[in-house]
Structures are given as C-alpha cells and as structure tokens.
Amino acid sequence: MAVLGIETSCDETAVALYDGKQGLLGHRLFSQIEVHREYGGVVPELASRDHVRKAIPLIKGLLDETGMQRTDIEAIAYTAGPGLMGALMVGCAIGRSLAWALQIPAIAVHHMEGHLLAPALETPAPDFPFVALLVSGGHTQLVDVRAVGDYRLLGDTLDDAAGEAFDKTAKMLGLPYPGGPELARLALQGVAGRFRFPRPMTDRPGMDFSFSGLKTFALNTLQKHPQADLQTKADIALAFEVAVAETLVIKCRRALQATSAGALVLAGGVSANQRLRERMRKMADTESARLFYPRTEFCTDNGAMIAYAGYQRLRAGQHSDLGFQPKARWPLDELPPA
Ligand code: KG4
Ligand code: ZN
C-alpha cells in the first residue's frame, strides 16, 4: 500500500510512490525545460498542455517500474497550490479522478509543505522543531516549524524570490532558462572581490528579504561594462551569488537565534546551490545547529515530496474533498495542524 504523489504546479511533471513502512518506492519526472527554453521562461499554457500529455504515462511507468498495481495505491496526493493555475488544474483533475475511480482518499498537498518536508526523505531526517528556509522560484520564506502543519512565518520576501532573482540575473548575463543553475556554473569561473553586491535588508533587524535590488545592481554593473567578456560576466555572477548566499545566511542565523531551534532545513530549488550550502554549513557549525537539505533532485520540484507530504496528512487522518479547488495563492500558515 502506498501514496501516489502527483506534482504539476509549474514546469515539471513528477510522480512518486511513498510507502509508510518501506519509504520511497520510486519516482519519475519529466522536465519541460526544452518546451520553454526558446521563450526564455515558463509559458503557462504550454506547461498545462505538457502536463496533460505526460502525467498518465509517467504514472503508468512508475507502476511498472515498482511492480505495483493500481489497486495497491492507498491514496492520491496531488499538488493543489500554490503555482500556475492551469498547471495545478491538470494534476488536481487527474488526482481527484483517479481517487474517485479507485475509491480511495485524495489529498490536496501544499507545494511548499512538500518542499519543507522533503529533507525527511533523507537519512538522517530532521526532528521537530526546526527552522526551514524555503528558497524556490516563487518563494523565499523562513518558517518556524514545530510539527507537520504547525508553521509560523518568521520572514518573507517583499518582492522577488531568491530563485526569481537568480533567473532574472542569469537572463541579463545571456544565460539560458532555467537561469539559477547556469549562473551558479558560470560563477565557478568568477574572480572573487572584483565586484561587491549589497546584502539587502541585513543592516536592520528582522527576517524579511528583498532581492529585486540585487537584480537592478546586476543590471547597472553590466551597463558599466557594455562589452562585458565572459570573465566579467563570471565575476558578476559570482558577486551576485555570494550576495544572495550571505544575505540568506545572515537571516537564517537570526532565525536560529530567535527560535533557539537546534536545526536548520534548506529546501526548494535554490537549496541545490553549492555555495549556499557551504556557507550555511559554516554558519550552522558556529551556531551549533544541525543542517539538513534534500538530495539535489529533491531540492527542485519532484513527486517524492508530494507523496511524502500526502502520506503525513493521511497518517494524521486527513484527506481532501473531491471538490477541492486548486489555489494559485495559498499561504503556508493557513494549513491545519496534522
Ligand atoms: O523549487 P523549484 O524547482 O520550483 C519552484 O517551486 O519555484 O525552484 C526553482 C528555482 C529556479 O528559480 C531555479 O533557477 C532555482 O530554483 N535553482 C537554483 C539552482 N538550482 C535551481 N538557483 C541557484 N542555484 C542552483 N544550483
Ligand atoms: Zn517548488
């Protein structure tokens, strides 16, 4: 018996099977990078259409690979928000229909709860309470996590999310979509110290973020170097990446001190960033806090985190009405306790 997870909130169609006793049984993902690349970003309508094409074949492939029958599925967890409305509706319609046909519960999963719990798919898994830094393309949030569903927002971004700032700056540097990992790769060739970017909102108390100024700073720097060669671009990429990482580190230190939590969890696409992980590791060591993050493929969107979050809700006796409507916007702290 297992929970089938379905993720279609943005540009990845992903499915997974999670079993309470055996753990993760399998997962499959189809990335739409090639679909969107020529447009330099995600085209929502194309994303929805591709989810329609890929979701069922991925589920069939996953069942074959794991040797499971449809009747072995105990519940269906699908991402119900936040995300692109059309894309969410595809996963929602498939998840609800399958649940109805199989006469099993459907669970509407919050995408960011999926990210937040993803480190628990690894060994060792973090124990509650912990501070979570959620850094993705759409979110930058610091959360005081006491238990599944017990989330207190400590800080949020006032404008761009960290991943969004990575993507926009990468675009300015002429890098293809998705920009974050491309910028990180270019930054590896950068010379430290040639440029210095600000650390936004670190000179005042609080745990909120603002990343749109960094993007403007990158634009201004590029305008001062109209014939920027690859080395100059790499130097800018490095200065930008260091500024984002240090800003996140400063706020995470504050969150650890404010909550006296002994553990920090990094999750969401930007938590795949090596420089961020290294700097967080140093800070966590000085704060005597344990650091957790998922394996790289579970930092970015995936089905495993949705199956796992759904399993946690199911275990708490919760499921969703088959009329549940997806939500493009959905504050994390509106979730009920498990
Ligand atoms: O969690 P995710 O897959 O999707 C959302 O829920 O948004 O996060 C995607 C974001 C993108 O902005 C992408 O550029 C960024 O994560 N990202 C990275 C890295 N890998 C993915 N940013 C910086 N460094 C990386 N290595
Ligand atoms: Zn995500």
Image: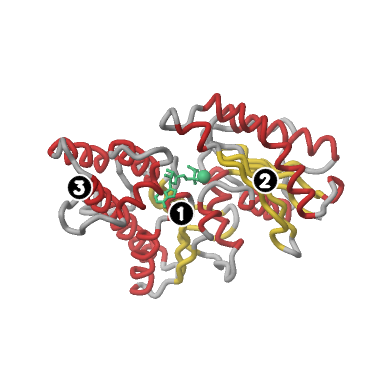
Quarter of the view holding residue 273: bottom left
Camera-side mark, 3 or 2: 3
Q: Alpha-carbon neighbours of circle 2 within 10 Å: few (<14), some, or many (≥20)?
A: many
Q: CA distance from mark 3 to mark 2?
A: 41 Å
* 293, above or below 288, in the image: above
Q: Which residue is mark 2?
A: 15
Q: Position of residue 61 (x, y in %)?
A: 74, 45
The label number, if any, that marks residue 232 in the structure image? 3
The percent coordinates of residue 288 (x first, y second) are 39, 75
Residue 74 % position (x, y): 81, 50
Question: Sequence order check: which comes first, mark 3 or mark 2?
Answer: 2
Q: Which residue is mark 1?
A: 143
Q: Residue 165 or 108: which is nearer the viewer?
A: 165
Label 3 packing within 10 angstroms: few (<14), some (14-19), many (20+): many
Q: Is residue 253 visible?
A: yes
Q: Quadrant of the N terminus?
A: bottom right
Circle number at residue 224: none
Residue name at image x 59 percent, y 62 percent: 120
First-in-chain label (3 vs 1): 1
Q: Estimate how packed mark 1 is, as few (under 14), some (14 to 19) or many (20 or more) residues with alpha carbons within 10 Å.
A: many
